[in-house]
Image (spheres, rainbow, N blue to C red):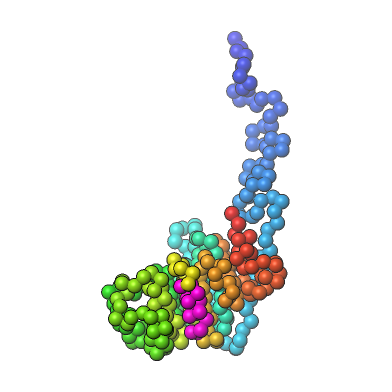
């Protein structure tokens, strides 16, 4: 005996009237694997009806013959099989530039910085500094400010200056002491007794007191007050050789973009933008900060 379905449900194995066969979309519905109208599709493309920001890659002009200061060739780093922190990244940085290394969290910035400084080994590809792989030579020409301090908290400021002077042949003690004096930091003060902002300044002074060819600064102004940020940026500008290059990794783009010559955007471990800051302003009529927000909009 058949039973009437009084709840509008189809008999088992059958589709209700007006419904498409299984596996086919309803009228007005997107097929499986595609986004709804106005939604965010896969692979990071913008919602329908919203144009994708124009992406640009403009290599830096070389100042001299010979190898580039920094070259990344198909640079790949995998922490987990099948997931790349850096994904065949190709990037060339020349001498004489202040460069912003920019990208959202998880884009591969810190991984890149650690490979440049020989703290990580690539899974594939290579990094070259003046044509050489990271090693004893590259450490002699790269001055690195990590996001977290590696300095011994029990040491006093003078001991840290003397340590750097002993360790790095290109370290200029007079420059460091002049900056510390201008800041009013007691040389006999232990690092652990200093405020967070003053610690940040001491670390930066030590890094910038080297006559390096490449300065790599990871979040140099994070967690400090605006006045401290101004001091740090002035220190960066006034204490490096104009033939050297400074790479600054930061999320505080608005605070630093006025000192940047060039910007590099990376996303999912790949290069998506390399240009001068001025070209971005001219082409798009917006600041680097606003363009960054557009490129990486969620």
Expressed as whole percent of the image width and height from the top left, the position of residue 184 reads 38, 80
Q: Does 13 appear above or below 31?
A: above
Expressed as whole percent of the image width and height from the top left, the position of residue 242 reads 55, 86
The front one of 276 and 73 is 276
Question: Would residue 70 be counted in the magenta stretch?
Answer: no
Q: Residue 177 is drawn in which quadrant? A: bottom left
Q: Residue at point 52% right, 66% down?
A: 252
Where does the magenta region start and end? 228-240
Counting labels gives 0
Expressed as whole percent of the image width and height from the top left, the position of residue 41 reads 63, 50
Q: Does 53 appear above or below 202?
A: above
Expressed as whole percent of the image width and height from the top left, the position of residue 193 reads 31, 72
Q: Left of 18 or right of it: where is 142?
A: left
Q: Residue 67 is drawn in which quadrant? A: bottom right
**Rendered-image quadrant of the N terminus:** top right
The front one of 112 and 275 is 275
Q: Is residue 174 at all visible to an observer of this figure? A: yes
The front one of 209 and 114 is 209
Question: Would residue 237 be counted in the magenta stretch?
Answer: yes
Q: Is residue 127 at all visible to an observer of this figure? A: no
Q: Residue at point 56% right, 62% down?
A: 267
Q: Residue furthest left?
A: 154
**Rendered-image quadrant of the C terminus:** bottom right
Q: Left of 124 or right of it: where is 165?
A: left
- Our reading of the magenta stretch's main secondary structure is helix
Q: Residue at point 61% right, 12% down?
A: 2
Q: Residue 200 is drawn in which quadrant? A: bottom left
The front one of 86 and 282 is 282
């Amino acid at each position: 005996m058949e039973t009437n379905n009084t709840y509008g449900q189809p008999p088992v194995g059958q589709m209700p009237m007006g419904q498409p066969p299984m596996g086919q979309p309803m009228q007005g519905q997107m097929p499986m694997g595609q986004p709804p109208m106005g939604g965010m599709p896969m692979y990071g493309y913008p919602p329908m009806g919203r144009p994708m920001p124009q992406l640009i890659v403009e290599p830096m002009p070389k100042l001299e013959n010979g190898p580039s200061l920094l070259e990344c060739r198909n640079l790949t780093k995998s922490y987990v099989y099948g997931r790349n922190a850096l994904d065949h990244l190709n990037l060339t940085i020349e001498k004489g530039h202040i460069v912003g290394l920019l990208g959202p969290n998880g884009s591969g910035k810190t991984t890149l910085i650690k490979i440049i400084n020989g703290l990580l080994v690539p899974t594939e590809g290579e990094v070259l500094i003046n044509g050489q792989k990271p090693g004893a030579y590259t450490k002699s020409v790269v001055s690195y400010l990590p996001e977290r301090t590696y300095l011994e908290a029990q040491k006093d400021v003078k001991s840290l200056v003397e340590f750097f002077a002993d360790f790095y042949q290109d370290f200029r003690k007079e420059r460091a002491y002049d900056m510390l004096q201008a800041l009013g930091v007691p040389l006999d003060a232990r690092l652990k007794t200093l405020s967070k902002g003053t610690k940040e300044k001491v670390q930066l002074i030590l890094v910038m007191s080297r006559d390096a060819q490449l300065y790599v600064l990871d979040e140099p102004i994070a967690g400090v007050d605006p006045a401290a940020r101004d001091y740090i940026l002035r220190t960066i500008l006034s204490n490096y050789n104009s033939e050297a290059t400074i790479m600054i990794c930061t999320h505080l783009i608005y605070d630093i973009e006025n000192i940047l010559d060039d910007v590099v955007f990376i996303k999912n471990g790949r290069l998506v933008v390399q240009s001068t800051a001025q070209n971005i302003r001219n082409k798009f009529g917006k600041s680097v900060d606003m363009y960054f927000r557009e490129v990486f909009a969620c």
